[in-house]
Image (cartoon, rainbow, N blue to C red):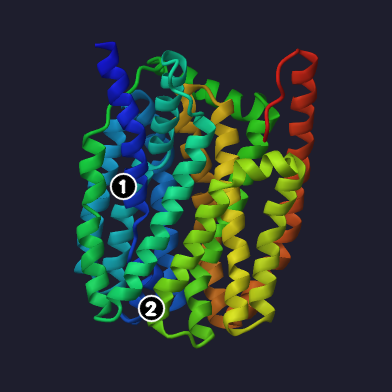
Amino acid sequence: MVSTVKRAIRNNIVKIYVLGFFMAFMVVMPVFVPLLQGFDLSMSQILQTQAIFALTIALCEVPSGYIADIWGRKNALVLGTALNAVGFVWMFYSDSFVDFVIYETILGVGMSMASGADLALLYDSEAYLKDSDADHSSEPSKSISRLVSIEAGAAAVAGLLTGLLMIWSLELVVLVQAVTGLLPLFLALSLVEPPRPFFASEHGNNAKKIVELLIFGKPVVLWTAIAIVLFGLMSLYAFWVYQKYWQAQGIPLIYFGYIWAGYGIAVSLSARWSIYLEQRLGARQLLILTAALPVIGFTGMAFFSGWVGILFGIAIQVSRGLSLSVFYEALNRRVPGEFRATVNSLVSLGTRGSFIITGPILGIAVDRLGVESTLAVLAAVFAPLAIAVVIPLCRRIKKEQRLARKQGSPPQAI
């Protein structure tokens, strides 16, 4: 019986990697802005749909993470992937601003249910096997970087497929998205829940414990969460400006998928090598590098045109891969298992909640100032914010490491 449980949980890990691949396999994303523009949506309206998507996630994120903790990660993933499948089918029939708002709402609920649950289930599965199976040598920290790398690789593969599909039509891209959007549901149904501590039924006490953990617990946890929010928001801005920027450079639509693939590869490789870089550079230098790269990328895109500007965009993607892998691993390592999905959801809520307010402003800026001027503004705003987060985080990591040495424990990385 025990061996059967271990085998099922060991299979969990592979299935979550494949699930993450197909959830990130979004062939429509490299051409999503031109797609909506084809239905006469302005950049401001496109960013409004994304603000609604962010609002939906903001409303559902914490309840969904809490549901995943008390109801089970698998159940949350099944519901989330089912809603995502419905959303992609709805998008296939959408042709107006209202239709795309409904699409983003359905997808927002689905994404919020899956967000945090997949990461928590992966970490729980690895932690269980590490404690119960002497032959299991993989570390939970490496699993997170692998998942981030796989998801970014999926985006790269999807981008290549998008480029091929665009030889025929944009409508074919949307059709393929509707079909492939069904695959994560079947994978989610085959997962199992590893043994772990569950929330008690006193919801008020649970909320109090989570608040104490984030705000009054380990200082590194709070500042890591803030870093995830800031760098996640930066990635969202870049994500929605890229395609408009490519249009401004006169890049033909057929090449969008290939550029997207290159960017996805940059995220995948940087996430995969993040642990190695941390060991080689140290926590402080890696954090400085992660903060500097987006500023370099935004600035280069603002002041250089054509393919040179597009190459500068890779710097933002490298930072994204590093920040996703390093920060999420650092957060999940310091959070108890029974709170993990909820805390991950709270962090995602911080990112999406910030985008609700600032996303439409970004769209207005692109429409009125132009994409290059908007990128210059993003560089000017992000630079001091990154410094304001990275310096306190470095100090708290250093303090935590000193305390660990005094207690005779090996110091943790970031």
Residue 3 position in % (x across, y down): 28, 15
Judging from the image, what secondary structure is the residue with disc 2 in? helix
Residue shown at 78% from the left, 19% from the top: 405
Residue 46 position in % (x across, y down): 41, 71
In the image, is 239 to the left or to the right of 118? right
Amino acid carrying mark 1 in the image: Gly
In the image, is 199 to the left or to the right of 398? left
Judging depth in this view, the residue of 310 and 386 nearest the camera is 310
Q: Residue 280, can we see it?
A: yes
Mark 1 or mark 2, which is nearer to you? 2
Q: Which mark is residue 413?
A: none
The N terminus, quarter of image: top left
Look at the picture and state if 323 lies above or below 221.
Answer: below
In the image, is 250 to the left or to the right of 326? left
- The quarter of the picture where residue 215 lies is top right
Q: Which mark is residue 110?
A: 1
Look at the picture and state if 246 lies above or below 352.
Answer: below
Look at the picture and state if 394 lies above or below 374.
Answer: above
Residue 391 position in % (x across, y down): 78, 44
Residue 345 position in % (x across, y down): 46, 38
Q: Say which residue label 2 marks.
A: 34
Distance of mark 1 from mark 2, alpha carbons? 24 Å
Judging depth in this view, the residue of 205 and 190 nearest the camera is 190
Residue shown at 73% from the left, 40% from the top: 283
* Residues packed near mark 1 inside 10 Å, few (<14), some (14 to 19) or many (20 plus): many
Residue shown at 30% from the left, 66% from the top: 100
Amino acid carrying mark 2 in the image: Pro
The C terminus, quarter of image: top right
